[in-house]
């Protein structure tokens, strides 16, 4: 049959086919399939796959495919990577998708890295680390042995763990500050070793002092100003500490006017927020306004103490466990058993180690010291991140 005759025949058959019922059309197709050879059946199979199993990852522009993928949960994304090589290639090349799922786990994202494979790897490590936290497998323990008497206080900075009493210092100002059981805060000259000023106003032991630059502005301080915080059992006092050294108290913070609620000696200040735990829970103050932004209530706040507080996670502990709390949900992500240690009421015998991971894990800052405390046998008990998370 020549081309012209065939086209005329095909048009006639098509018109007749469209006039048939569904059942009659099916019978026609069955008849044609029975008369077909291998080449026709292969052609039919390829055509049906395209018509009935439309692959949106192949048909859609990459931008639209990436947009749709962002609506899938991480586990579904990983499952989709197993469908075929093409799907794995497309899904594994979407940087925003993998950055997004990393953020959901509390991982810090460096926007300058646009390698999707890198972020997929980071997510897989992040998922493993979060599972280890949940299953109590994220940490390991060690001990430092050498003291022949009780260790009363620990201090950690720049990777060094020391046994000293609670102080803070600043090289630029050439000052060291210290709190005392005589209810005072003293400001010392580092170079001269002389007391420059004695700050009074506390009515209890001063158990914590922090010297830090302000990062926010208010009516009484500006960004860059040096601020001294001192805390006792009931109050936190804020002092401006400049080169003139002499200063007056800017503000006194407390959680109860009648002193019925005690503060715990775990004061924290990063230049923007003041955080302190109490018998009611963990309090967060805005340093610009001195208003209470948040109170995290806990089941047993009198026995649960704050170690360190970040943007994503907080580290807390009681007499039996070390806890990692997700601050976005205020739920515990994981815990780690602790031995029977000496819990100082002044908070000097235990401390947090590296704390950058509390602002979000980045694939590298989940390493090193997490927690240290003194033990009855005069040793120092360490909790460390387990390697190869």
Image (cartoon, rainbow, N blue to C red):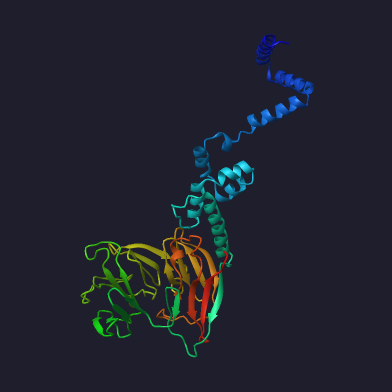
Residue 68 at x, y percent in the picture: 52, 41
Residue at left offset 54%, top offset 35%: 60
Quadrant housing the N terminus: top right
Residue at horizontal 48%, vertical 58%?
A: 107
In the image: residue 139, left or right of residue 307: right
Say which residue appears at 27% left-offset and 84% top-offset: 192
Q: Position of residue 364 (x, y in %)?
A: 50, 63
Q: Residue furthest bottom?
A: 148
Closest to the observer, 121 or 143: 121
Q: Is residue 198 above or below residue 85?
A: below
Task: Report if residue 258 is visible in the image.
Answer: no
Viewer can see residue 66? yes
Residue 301 drawn above or below residue 148: above
Residue 63: horizontal and vertical position, in percent? 49, 39
Name the one closer to the observer, 345 or 140.
140
Q: How many marks?
A: 0
Q: Where does residue 353 sit, x and y in percent of width and height?
A: 46, 72
Query: Quadrant location of residue 295?
Result: bottom left
Left or right of 244 on screen, residue 35: right
Residue 48 to residue 161: above or below: above
Horizontal side of residue 81 vs 161, given as left or right: right
Quadrant in which the C terminus appears: bottom right
């Amino acid at each position: 049959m020549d081309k012209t005759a065939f086209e005329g025949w095909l048009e006639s058959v098509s018109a007749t086919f469209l006039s048939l019922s569904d059942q009659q059309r099916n019978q026609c197709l069955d008849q044609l399939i029975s008369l077909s050879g291998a080449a026709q059946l292969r052609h039919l199979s390829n055509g049906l796959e395209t018509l009935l199993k439309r692959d949106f990852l192949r048909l859609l522009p990459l931008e639209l495919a990436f947009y749709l993928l962002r609506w899938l949960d991480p586990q579904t994304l990983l499952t989709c990577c197993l469908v075929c090589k093409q799907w794995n290639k497309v899904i594994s090349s979407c940087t925003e998708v993998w950055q997004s799922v990393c953020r959901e786990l509390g991982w810090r994202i460096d926007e300058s890295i646009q390698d999707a494979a890198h972020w997929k790897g980071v997510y897989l490590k992040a998922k493993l680390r979060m599972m280890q936290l949940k299953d109590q497998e994220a940490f390991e323990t060690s001990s430092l042995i050498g003291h022949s008497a009780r260790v009363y206080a620990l201090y950690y900075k720049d990777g060094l763990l020391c046994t000293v009493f609670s102080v803070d210092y600043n090289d630029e100002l050439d000052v060291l500050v210290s709190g005392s059981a005589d209810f005072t805060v003293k400001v010392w000259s580092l170079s001269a070793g002389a007391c420059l000023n004695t700050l009074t106003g506390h009515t209890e032991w001063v158990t914590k002092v922090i010297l830090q630059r302000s990062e926010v502005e208010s009516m009484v301080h500006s960004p860059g100003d040096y601020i001294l915080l001192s805390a006792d059992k009931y109050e936190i006092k804020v002092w401006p500490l400049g080169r003139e050294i002499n200063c007056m108290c800017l503000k006194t913070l407390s959680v109860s006017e009648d002193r019925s609620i005690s503060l715990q000696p775990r004061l924290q200040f990063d230049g923007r927020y003041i955080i302190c735990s109490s018998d009611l829970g963990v309090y967060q103050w805005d340093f610009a306004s001195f208003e209470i932004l948040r109170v995290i209530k806990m089941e047993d706040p009198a026995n649960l103490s704050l170690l360190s507080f970040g943007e994503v996670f907080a580290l807390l502990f009681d007499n039996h466990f070390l806890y990692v709390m997700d601050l976005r949900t205020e739920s515990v992500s994981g815990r780690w058993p602790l031995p029977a240690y000496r819990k100082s009421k002044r908070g000097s015998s235990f401390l947090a180690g590296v704390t950058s991971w509390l602002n979000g894990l980045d694939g590298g800052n989940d390493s090193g010291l997490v927690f240290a405390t003194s033990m009855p046998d005069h040793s120092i008990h360490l909790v460390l991140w387990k390697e190869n998370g």
